[in-house]
Amino acid sequence: MTRELTIKDALNEALRQAMEADDDVVLLGEDIAGGAGRDEAYPEAADAWGGPFGVTQGLLGQFGRDRVMDTPIAETGFVGASIGMAIAGMRPVPEIMYVDFIGTSFDQLLNHAAKLRYLYGGKVSVPMTVRTVTGAGFRAAGEHSQTLYSLYTHIPGLKVVAPATPYDAKGLLLAAIQDSDPVIFMEHKRLYMTTGHVPEEPYTIPLGTASIVRAGDDVTIIGVQKMVHTALEAATELEQQGISCEVIDPRSYSPLDTDTILTSIRRTGHLVVVDESHPRCSLATDISALAAEHAFHDLRGPVRMVTGTHSPVPFSPPLEDLYVPDVPRIVDAVRSTLDQGRKGAEAVAHGR
Amino acid sequence: MIEDRDTLLGLWQRMTRIRRFEERASTDKEADLLEGYIHNYSGQEAIATGIITQLRADDWITSTYRNHGHSIARDVPLEAMTGELLGRTTGVCGGKGGSMHAVDQDLGMIGGMGIVAGGMPIAAGAALAARRRGQDRVAVTFFGDGAVHQGAFHESMTFAALFNCPVIFVCENNLYAETTAVDYHLIAGSVIAMAEPYGVHATQVDGMDVFAVRDAAEQLIARARYTGRPALLEAMTYRYGGQYEGDTQTYKPPQEVAQWRARDPLLTFRRRVTEPGLLTHGDLDEVAERSRVEVADAFAAAALAPWPDPSVLLTDVYTEIS
Ligand SMILES: Cc1ncc(C[n+]2csc(CCOP(=O)(O)OP(=O)(O)O)c2C)c(N)n1
Ligand SMILES: [Mg+2]
């Protein structure tokens, strides 16, 4: 029997199972339970919230405040403390409420979590999982809508994971928590209510394995987190036009499953990368460069990137809708690389 | 202090405008007429009003995502605020910022910041710039009780104290940081206690009483202006609504809102001015009704205002488009 869960509930179940399996797994973050300071006077307060999106709801009741820690708004403090807890044998899971707020704890991630193992010659490891929330299209403006995938991917020592389905959300979160390295685990705010099959028993998905979410022959589309779904919609539309798209979700950006991506590109000869982040130094440019360097002779058309713009995410709905990549832009990009490829092939055939 | 009629009516006008604005924003949000986050300021009107009416026109202000009250107290045109809430060209940011960033540079409102404590060092810097440029402008930075745990709070206080920045740190202690109660998170016991080690002069005041806030602000602003030293004001208040519209507020004890509403800043003001006969209920009702109409007109105008042109998506990223 298939059991359908939302991504939100799949994540909640993963956290619960990780905590049941290992007493050293502890959650820390702002309002992740909610109602701190009201437990005695008003017990209903506790656990009423579970974070702004309700992902951690109900965990306080089972595990108590020592393991579901509502922190002050002090990201440097609780992210840094998580590093110390991890070095000292625990598996902390701090939550940065929105990825945009990570700036306030960035030094601890950039210079400590990411580097200690290397700089100390492999003598320590930092098994912590930083959960955080990404994504535009929420009418939340420029300081609550970023994705910043590439900011973390750029840093050696950090692993970066971003699920797009409930199945992947649970399996990747359990894998991240069991992993011996610091993992930035990114949850897209507009995917929390996406439903799909999730097995009840705990399972893990190895970090660094891409998923081919739709097989096809004419073009490879790489979707970055929520854009996997937009790419799938575009693929359905393109199928009606006789174009067969292969859609790949890398799922983890560091490590990146370059084999699966390159194998597909070599076979289809066309690459479109869809990433809602800003275009410069993004996953879109990173994966495009991968193709340029390692699949140049297999490419039969120009690589196309469908991304957000080189601007902050605006509030105004019509502007924000222009910012976020949509189906028509992906369809255009696919048609454009195929057309260019065809013209190029004709030119060669005519000896021009 | 002798209270002249116009001053009193000015305070009342701002407080009623804020309350009506926030009530309207709340119902419109509930009716799905507004997109994005709305952080309601209801209950805290006396603080924005008491402080900002004591500022000079050229003084600086930084605010937060909960900035409507500060903007209205600073006389930001209501239509420009509603325009921003609706993402229209008429908005203070042309629609790019939305509710959390609605501000007015022409009025010294540097900005509403979405990151907790983000405005504090910026205000300290604006205050320092004024001094370095031979001006006697001061800066006020508004923030909540939860913000004092940020490094930015401590780093800006030490910066402001060391470099003599005439900045007034205003903590609106409304009992909660999101769902987290202040008696749980505020380990120092009070915010004024946190200013002391930095040598920042600090005062606590009843934030539900606009007269108390105004008198404290007058002194602190004058002090900052003439000594060039930073100061901190902790105003004790209460957030009637949730963290944002739509928050279920299950973490609030049942009687709490009613207890604080009994000390409502608008009710308190009404009593304080009608009992000694400074103003009549009729005077107050007339202004309150005008505020309601102004707010309704502003929302109506915004709903008819044009959407931004697609081309502006890429403007303002840099000073010049390259
Ligand atoms: C650095 C950072 N961390 C977390 C948040 C999310 N957040 C927004 S408001 C808020 C609570 C702030 O409480 P307080 O400072 O008391 O201000 P209030 O909302 O009560 O006015 C939190 C945690 C944020 N915006 N920035
Ligand atoms: Mg507060």
Image (tube, coloured by chain):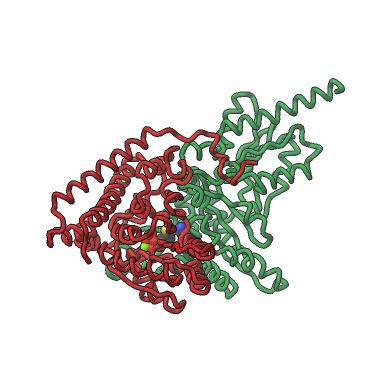
Chain colours: A green, B red
Rendered-image quarter of ligand 2: bottom left
Asked if residue A255 lies left or right of residue B154, the reply is right
Looking at the picture, how far across and down is residue B170, in whole percent?
39, 65
Asked if residue A331 lies left or right of residue B56, the reply is right
Q: Most extreme residue toward the right, as rendered?
A: A351
On the question of residue B238 being in view, the answer is: yes
Tell me: residue B11, above or below residue B96. Answer: below
Q: Residue at x 50, y 68 (%)?
A: B156
Q: Where, by quadrant of the figure, is residue A122 drawn?
A: bottom right
Looking at the picture, how far across and down is residue A298, in whole percent?
79, 37
Residue closest to the eye, B73 or B33: B73
Q: Residue at x 46, y 44 (%)?
A: B93
Q: Residue at x 71, y 43 (%)?
A: A288
Quadrant, the C terminus of chain B: top right
Tell me: residue A148, above or below residue A38. Answer: above
Looking at the picture, how far across and down is residue A98, in whole percent?
50, 55
Quadrant, the N terminus of chain B: bottom left
Asked if residue A80 lies left or right of residue A5, the reply is right
Residue closest to the eye, B309 or A319: B309
Residue closest to the eye, A250 or B133: B133
